[in-house]
Image: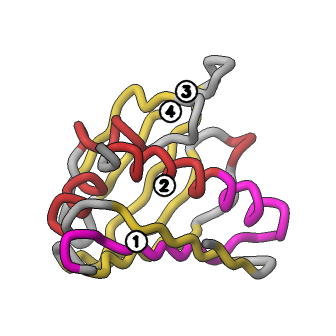
Amino acid sequence: MSTKTSTSLTVSRVVKADTETVFRAWTEPGQLQLWSAPEGATVTAAEVDLSVGGRYKIHMRNEQGEPHTAFGVYRTIEPNTRLVYTWTWEEEDHDVGETLVTVEFNDLGGSTEIVLTHERFPNAELTANHEQGWTSCLNRLGGMFSH
């Protein structure tokens, strides 16, 4: 499920794993490399300093081999419950300015509902592009736990 305005989007997904497992998938470099790029792209490296004020960086390559590097700073960390962090792109041709991502992990008793809100986009086109990207990433994440 997803909703969006011209400058923000919300995407949600239920995955078959407990909140602790899903939170680790979102915050551990080795786990991020398994899912944190749209389908068809790969994560070549992930760096995480999981502390308020700590930085993260996710290095991706699309199907054409072009680099896409997302980075930002953690603003709020509530283990197994909520993450808030800034998001921007390193490559100038992908720059959207600093945006804000909030991820909530809702315990459904053996499953987890992920509610991701990404806001502060400069225009509707970039909002729509990121909605597609996040939806694809969540497809990959859900696939990790569907066995």
Residue 88 picture location, percent across and down: 56, 56
For marks 1 and 2, the one nearer the N-term is 1
Per the rendered image, the range of residues in magenta is 109-132
The residue that disc 1 covers is 114
Give the Cα separation between the discs numbered 3 and 4: 4 Å
Residue 37 picture location, percent across and down: 50, 41
SS under mark 1: strand
The label number, if any, that marks residue 60 in the structure image: 4
Give the Cα separation between the discs numbered 1 and 3: 25 Å
Q: Which of the two residues, 118 or 11, is positioned nearer the viewer here?
A: 11
- Where is residue 22, by image quadrant? bottom left
The three-letter code of the residue at mark 2 reads Leu
Say whether residue 126 is magenta: yes
Q: Is residue 102 above or below residue 73?
A: below
For marks 1 and 3, the one nearer the N-term is 3
Residue 146 picture location, percent across and down: 34, 48
Give the Cα separation between the discs numbered 2 and 4: 16 Å
The three-letter code of the residue at mark 1 reads Ile
The residue positioned 77% from the left and 62% from the top of the image is 128
Whether the residues at callouts 1 and 2 have beta carbons within 8 Å, the answer is yes
The residue positioned 25% from the left and 55% from the top of the image is 27
Say whether residue 2 is magenta: no
Residue 120 picture location, percent across and down: 65, 76
Give the Cα separation between the discs numbered 1 and 2: 9 Å
